Amino acid sequence: MASTGFFAGMITAGVLLGAGFVGGSLVAQQMLEPAPEAAAAAADQLPPARVVLPPLTAQAAPPASAPVETSAPPPAQLQPRPQLIPAKDDSSERAAEKEKQARSSADDERQARRAEQREAEAAERRKKRYAERKAKRDAARGKQQEQHLQQQHQLREAAQQPRRPGVMAFDDEAQHPSTTGFFGN
């Protein structure tokens, strides 16, 4: 009879856990899906329009919906004339560019050498610190071993010395009156 109650309780607990899990998943699914009213309202709204304006420097082009004229203007009037830039001596520009590149490569080499030098100095400092720490550790270890050996030596000497019997003495209470404490003797 006790075993049937146990199994009934186990089954009830399993059913309650399953129902809780299913109910929680249904609530989560409803929260993730948008409401039908919100979906209909979103469909009624128009998407934002993108307006592209022509650049201010270009000549205004006639709108596409305007009627096209039968006589076409000469091609020179359709496109703006390019501005002519006087030609410079290319060899001086090339020389200046090469000089800049040479300076930048020299600077890069100097920086690389400095970086290597700093790394080498840092490595030397690390090695020096390591050597100092190792020397301190070795000195402390040697001192500790020496103390340990001295203690062992003292114990051996104490073991080799003959024991003297201890003296037991009794004190007379008449000379030293006893004081009573809070709880008595």
Image (spheres, helix red, strand yellow):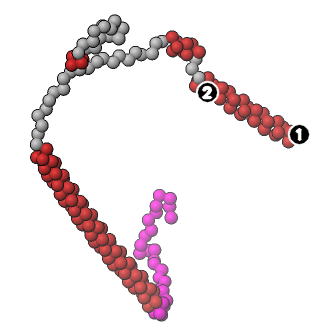
Q: For marks 1 and 2, give the CA distance.
A: 41 Å
The quarter of the picture where residue 30 lies is top right
Q: Position of residue 125 (x, y in %)?
A: 26, 68
Quadrant containing the N terminus is top right
Q: Residue at x 30, y 7 (%)?
A: 69
Q: Is residue 43 left or right of residue 102?
A: right
Comes first in the chain, label 1 or label 2? 1
Q: Residue at x 20, y 55 (%)?
A: 105
Mark seen at residue 1: 1
- Give coordinates of residue 158: x percent, y percent: 45, 89
Type of amino acid under label 1? Met
Residue 123 occupies which quadrant of the picture? bottom left
Q: Nearer the viewer, mark 1 or mark 2?
A: 2
Question: In this image, 143 relative to 157: left or right?
Answer: left
Of 181 and 4, the residue lying toward us: 4
Inspect this view and state whether residue 57 appears: no
Residue 76 in the figure: left or right of residue 173: left
At a point 23% along the width and 15% down the height, the residue shown is 74
Residue 63 on image: x %, y %: 32, 10
**Which residue is denoted by mark 2 in the rendering?**
28
Q: Which residues are magenta?
A: 159-185
Does the magenta run of residues contain 171? yes
